[in-house]
Amino acid sequence: MENERIERAAARRERVRKTLTYLFLGFWALMVLFPFYWMLLSSVKSYGAYNAEYIPQFYTLSPTMENYREAFTAVPLAKYFLNTLVFTLVTTGLMLGVTVLAAFAFSRLEFRGKDLVFTFFLALMMIPSELVVITNFQTITNAGLRNTFTGLILPSVTSVFYIYLLKENFEQIPDELYRAAKVDGTTDFRYLTRVMIPICRPTIITVTILKVIECWNSFVWPRLITDDTNYFLVSNGIQAIRENGFGRENIPAMMAAVVVISVPLIVLFLCFRKKIMAGVSRGGTKG
C-alpha cells in the first residue's frame, strides 16, 4: 500500500510538472506568434476599418485582399522580389562552393601552415562586423562596383562560421575511408562529391537554408552599397515604402507587403525544420 501511495504521488507530481510545462510553452508560443497573427490580420483589414478602430480589434468580419493589390502596384515590389531572388540564389551557390571546398581542405588535405591558417580564420570571427562592413564598402566603392549585383554579392560569398561548421562535420568521417579511396585511385574532388557531401548532406542543407535566410533578410550592406531602386532588395524596399511610400499612412497595405515578404522564409523553415535541427546537432557532435 505504501508503495502504491508513493507511485500515485509521483504520478501526480509528474502530471503537474507536464501541465505547468505545457502551459508555459503554450503561453510562450502565443507571445511569439501573436505579432505574426497581428501582421496577417492587419493586412486583410480595409484602410477605413483599420483607422476607425479606436480600440484594436483582434478579428475582422470583412477581410479584403485590396491591400495586397496596392502593395504590388504602389511600389515595384515584384522587382524587389526578383532582385532578392537573384541575389539569394547566386550568393548561396557561390558561398556553398567556397565553403565546401575550404572545409574539405582544412579537414582532409595536408599542407604547410594549415593549422595556422585555420586559427587565423577563426580569429576573423572576433572582428566586429561594423569594421568588416566599412572595409568592404571602401573596397567595393574603389572598385567601382556600387549599384551592381557584383558589389552586392561579393562580400557575402564566404563565411568563416560555415567553414568551421562543415570542417567539424567532415572530420567526423573516418580517415580510413579517405585512405581506402586514395588507394583505389579516387581523386580528392571525386571523394568529396561521392562520399563526404552525401554523408554530410543534413549539415550542408542546414547551411544552405541559413544562408538563404541571411540573404533574404540582408539590410545593412544593400542599404550602404545601393541607392538605385533598380537594385533594391525586399528589405530595402520595405524601408523605402515606410519612408517614402504609402507605409506611413496606409498601415494595412504596409502589413500586406511585409506578409508577402515573410511568407517564403516561413514556408522554407517549416518544410526543412527537421533537417535544420539534424544538421546543427550533427555539426556540434564529435565521434
Image (cartoon, helix red, strand yellow):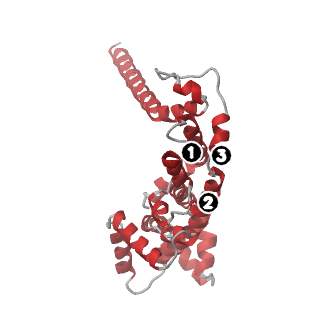
Q: Position of residue 127 (x, y in %)?
A: 32, 67
Helix, strand or loop for disc 2: helix
Helix, strand or loop for disc 1: helix
Separation of marks 3 and 2 at Cα, in angstroms = 15 Å
Which residue is tagged 1?
262
For the N terminus, the quadrant is: top left
Separation of marks 1 and 2 at Cα, in angstroms = 16 Å
Residue type marked 2: Asn
Q: Position of residue 255 (x, y in %)?
A: 55, 38
Disc on the earlier residue, 1 or 2: 2
What number is the disc on residue 72?
3
The residue at the point 65 percent across, 46 percent down is 72
Q: Position of residue 33 (x, y in %)?
A: 49, 34
Quarter of the image where one finds residue 231: bottom right
Separation of marks 3 and 1 at Cα, in angstroms = 15 Å
Quick one: label 3, few (<14), some, or many (20+) residues within 10 Å? some
Q: Is 42 situated above or below 113?
A: above
Most extreme residue toward the bottom is: 112
What number is the disc on residue 83?
2
